[in-house]
Image: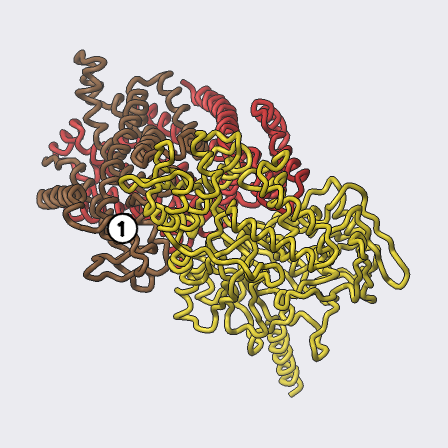
Chain colours: A red, B yellow, C brown
Amino acid sequence: MSILRRIARLILTMIATVLLGTLVTGLLVRLAPGFDVDARQLDSRLAHESKEALRDQRLKNADIMHFCIAYLGAAATGDFGESLTLNRPVRELIVERFPTTLRIVGLGLVGGWLLAVTFAFSSVLLHRAAYDAATATISGALLCVPSAVMALLFVLFRAPAQLAIALIVFPRLFRYARNVLESSYSMPHIITARAKGLGMVRVLCWHVIPVSAAPLLALAGVSVSVALGAAVPVEALCGIPGIGQLAWQAAMGRDLPLLITSTVLVTLVTLTANAISDLVTCSLSSSRV
Amino acid sequence: MIARCKTAILVLFVIVTTVMAYASELRFCLRSEPKTFNPIMVDDDAAETIRYLTGGVLLRVNRQTQALQPELATNWKVSKDGRTITFVLREGLYFSDGSPFTAEDVASTVQQLMDPAVHSSTGDSFRSGQGKVVTTILAGNRIAITFPAPVAGLDRLFDQVAIMSARSSKKEMAVLGPYYVADHKPGSYIMLKRNDNYWKRDGSGRKLPKIDVIWLDIQSNRDIETLRFKRGEIQLINSIDADYYERLSSSMPGALHDSGPSLDSEQIWFNQVAKAPLPAYKLAWFRSQAFRRGVSEAINREDLARVVFGDHARPAMGPISPANRLWFNAKLQPVHYNPSGAIARLQQDGFHLQNGILLDRDGHAVEFSIITNSGNKYRERMATMIQQDLLKIGVKVNVVTLDFPSLIERITEKFNYEAALLGLVNNELDPNAQMNVWLSSGDNHQWNPRQKSPETAWEADIDQLMRAQASAVTLKDRKRSMDRVQDIVAEQVPFIYLVNKNALSAISTTIQGTAPVSLRPQTYWNLEQWTLANGTTGSGK
Amino acid sequence: MKYLRIFAIALLSMVAITSLGAGFLTTVDYATQFREAPNAAPSNAHWLGTDQLGRDRFARILYGTRVSLLLAPAAALISTLFAALIGGVAGFVGGAWQRWATMLIDLVLSLPWLFLLITVRALLPLNVPPLISVIVTFLLLGMLGWAASARVMCAWAGAVRNSDFVLQARATGVRGCRLAIVHVLPNLKPLLAAQFWISIPVFILAEANLGILGLGVAEPLPSWGSLLRELEDLAIYSGELWKLVPLVLLILVVSSFELLLSRTEVSA
């Protein structure tokens, strides 16, 4: 299938996924308890009319189908509504905070992949039990540290938040990458190649990597969403003004316009990353055959 | 020779300007992003902080003496019927942008505040009845404000009203307070700079404030805030948790302050709403005075204060904290921990112990859940301790922590809960602010809100007493009514009051002039008087 | 490698036995609050000191292990199965099925499932028995945690399907189920093992975070997640190192699982 047709299909799928995602998010938020309440209802100084006004403001979005359609219509013109918790246009909030998150997540991903690839390849090439055990313990230890503690340690040692994301993402990537490479190494035709006397590096570059390319690229696509997920606790706990912190505050405050916009953003980023990895995989496999 | 002189002068100039550029700076944290800079719409803590530091008010409650003192108004008088207040305004003052301060600004602020379309806690505090608020500008720089109905404690309410300019193009950003908002990076920080037009001077005639710049960093994580204080990155924690108080006091002596009990209380209440989706027998328990008093006596408040708050709290006796010297009923008796007394009281209502389990008269085992908001570890710990206390009298308690919106929905709309543990945050001394809590028709009458007519005799009594104090003319009459309300609450226990937390704060020893108190804002209430020792700077960004 | 594996088995068995026999190893109940000694240092009475409410930490670790060690692997198994079924099968079948599965997986990755969890809490009664609450929690975690690895599994299964040796097998007439089970599945096992191993600590920690929503293990029942939350206390950075014991234990257990699950070496 031509690359153009593939891209066109991918774009259509992305649009359909975003639309579906918007609707499902809206439903999830609407059905969850606490949709039409506001923390200010517990303030005894507020008059009854004020509390009713607060509730009415929230209930304006009660018809979720209506809201989603109106939202998507407005979003097409660049208007993403106004945040209920911060009283500012959602677009402004996102534009302010997006670069921060992009920087942290981007650098964190790069760092995480560097670490994962280094350890995975070296582990497979060296084939030493002690080295494997050591890397397993280190990556296991990183998985066991709660994100709150990680954030606190980073503030304690004044380390950049990007490193926190890298260390959160690294163990997941490392484990998969290593197992994929290890598994490829043990495939029958690769064993044959090794038996024929081909060098380790040659086997790796010419035989193992092409076979592992597909899942590794898929892992790359998925790692973007893993890193985005890690950004939420890291930003919230370290007090970094990014999208992650915004999304968490929006969730706790049932801020529908902000929540839907941040979900759409996350969906788009995830889909784009996965789409790119799919395209690259396809072009690699087609060029191979 | 001339060249050398020129170089020397240049170097001197650079040195002097560099030294001068080291303006004195103070840095501390806000726990959330302020939702607004408009002083009329202030509803959250962060916005309240900014209003306090930038807003000029007509009258100020001195947080230390709890007395009312003149600010922008040099004199004031409340009419006998409690409906009109007349202010004599200070003359020759200017807003931070240079526009003059006149009576029109006061009138315009009040009109905006009392606009029926505006919904804010500041404005609602004044709403005593239907009708327009009339502002009359009088000769001699005076203004009279008349409300449609008497407002209890009218003059003290003006502590919350920051005057905005009627004419300035900067609208709410032109201020009369010691500082103005110079920079704002959303999600990150707010920078306040000293207002050169601020009218106040200190005893020796020097212009206030003395500190030039205040950085307010937005930091919701208290662990990190404490860490930053320990490192000296911030100089102040306005309200520090009891855990950190002990932790820091050993390494930073002199920096930690315990100002005694605050106005806040922590309490538990049972759901008494008739249409609540609870089994009838459980509702019967919660509506039984003996049950509520028995549970109250079975809770060890001393342990709560000691273990959870490290003795930085005191067992609470009622709705008004002892820190509220004027309104606290000094004759109230504390509730002592008495499990055997609790069981005896419960037996009066048909409850009995069988194999260590408390059963009601129909044989149902007494079991209920307490909901509280997650993220507040002190409440979670108190709930866990209460769970153990009540186990000793055979009652099984399930502790459920919920996210705040779910919790609010349960206690204000759906009423699908059994008992709740929350705290009451009191910013005002005047109990009139709690009308909505004590009136049976009130939204915040937490155990059974929005009653069409009082469902019990004692709630009817409280309704009558609260209305009496709101319209009473003398302070003595008001106090008498409020004392009686506190007595009824102690008998009927609609709220089981647990502890009054102490006001704890941390202030760097490099700051001079501080006097932390228990009323909010605990530390920076007199910030305009502070100086940094040795002219040192706070650490910059 | 063999000795490490023996060590891993020994450690896991010891942890399992001590947690099941918690009643014999300590006479102290995990819920009893020694209110005279909150935050106490280790002593003869309390081997690992007490927590903020004066509860014996050693007892809480023993009893907490039961909950976490039993349920986290079960939840990890559920999520691994979901990943294998949805990702693996779709990747193997290919074509339109793979496209639809990919779309579903991407959607699941992006949605805020927090609200589903909040709704589930609202549907459960407030007085739900702690065991039911725990089981529901880990069940939910298992059903929501599979998306990332499903995508990788999908791609891997597709790559394996197109690889030389599978093409060879198909050329010799092997089809359908036999092809899947005999040739493709064994190659998916390392990925499944990775997913299982990663999920265990992730779910143990997630359970503690779910406490924010009212799910998770209810007081006074301890769990490793709640024990690890103690680490958020700044105190350990000033020397109260015994609070690190739950973390060290978790790392050892997780590493032991990994050692057991890793592939045997294929000696060339």
As displayed, is residue B88 above or below residue A29? below
As displayed, is residue B381 above or below residue A219? below
Front-most of residues C153 and B533: B533
Front-most of residues B269 and C205: B269
Q: Residue furthest right?
A: B139
Q: Tell me the kind of residue under disc 1.
A: Leu
For mark 1, what is the residue?
Answer: C247
Residue C35 location, quadrant: bottom left
Of the 4 image quadrants, the one containing the C terminus of chain A is top left
As displayed, is residue A2 above or below residue A257? above
Q: Residue furthest top?
A: C173
Q: Position of residue C1 (x, y in %)?
A: 11, 44
Q: Dot 1: what SS?
A: helix
The answer to whether any part of residue A169 appears in the image is: no
Say how many tags the image has. Answer: 1
Q: Position of residue B70 (x, y in %)?
A: 74, 66
- Neighbours of disc 1 within 10 Å: few (<14), some (14-19), many (20+): some
As displayed, is residue B102 above or below residue B513? above
Q: Position of residue B227 (x, y in %)?
A: 43, 61
The answer to whether any part of residue B92 appears in the image is: yes
Q: Residue at x 42, y 29 (%)?
A: C123
Of the 4 image quadrants, the one containing the N terminus of chain A is top left
Taking the image as shown, residue B438 lies to the left or right of residue C151, namely: right
Q: Residue at x 72, y 42 (%)?
A: B118
Chain ID at mark 1: C
Residue B120 location, quadrant: top right
Front-most of residues C76 and C102: C76
Q: Position of residue A127 (x, y in %)?
A: 16, 43
Taking the image as shown, residue C148 lies to the left or right of residue A46, namely: left
Q: Residue furthest front?
A: B348
Front-most of residues B520 and A120: B520
Residue C196 location, quadrant: top left
